[in-house]
């Protein structure tokens, strides 16, 4: 795994390594609105992840996930706060992200 100091550094390097899709959480999937793609938990793999913790504020905590999908032949990035588990997403999606 790589070592990054900032979220921006991680996202930029992952893009250089082919992780070009930008994903967001939805109720039961991750989605790339730009390309109209929705991936269910069984359709993607988390290749890498990086945790960033705020120096002064524990609320400034973020995880960057490097995501790939063999089914859709793509790679992308999901950036989300540690508090994702309090959002209204499916238990299956929470379990997939929580294992990393």
Image (tube, helix red, strand yellow):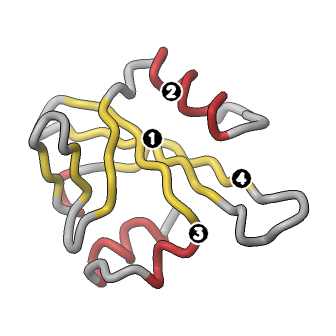
Compute the Cα span from label 2 to label 4: 15 Å
Whether label 2 touches label 1, CB < 8 Å: yes
Question: Going by the image, does 19 lie left or right of 44?
Answer: right
Which mark is first along the chain, 1 or 2? 2
- Residue 28 in the image: above or below residue 80: below
Q: Earlier in the sequence, mark 3 or mark 4?
A: 4
Which element is circle 3 on?
A: helix
Residue assigned mark 2: 14
Residue 63 % position (x, y): 58, 55
Residue drawn at point x = 44 percent, y = 42 percent:
47
Near mark 4 (Cα within 10 A), the count class, few <14, some 14-19 or many ≥20, is some
Circle number at residue 66: 1
17 relative to 3, above or below: above
Q: Which residue has dot 4 on it?
A: 52
The image quadrant that residue 96 belongs to is bottom left
- Label 4 to label 1: alpha-carbon separation: 14 Å
- Do callouts 3 and 2 mark residues in contact (Cβ within 8 Å)? no
Earlier sequence position, callout 4 versus callout 1: 4
Pointer 3: what residue? 82
């Amino acid at each position: 795994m790589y070592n990054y100091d900032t979220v921006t550094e991680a996202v930029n390097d992952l893009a250089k390594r082919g992780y070009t899709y930008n994903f967001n959480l939805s109720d039961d999937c991750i989605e790339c609105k730009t390309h109209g793609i929705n991936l269910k938990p069984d359709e993607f793999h988390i290749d890498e992840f990086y945790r960033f913790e705020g120096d002064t504020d524990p609320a400034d905590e973020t995880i960057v996930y490097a995501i790939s999908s063999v089914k859709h032949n793509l790679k992308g990035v999901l950036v989300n706060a540690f508090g994702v588990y309090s959002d209204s997403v499916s238990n299956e999606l929470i379990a997939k992200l929580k294992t990393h």
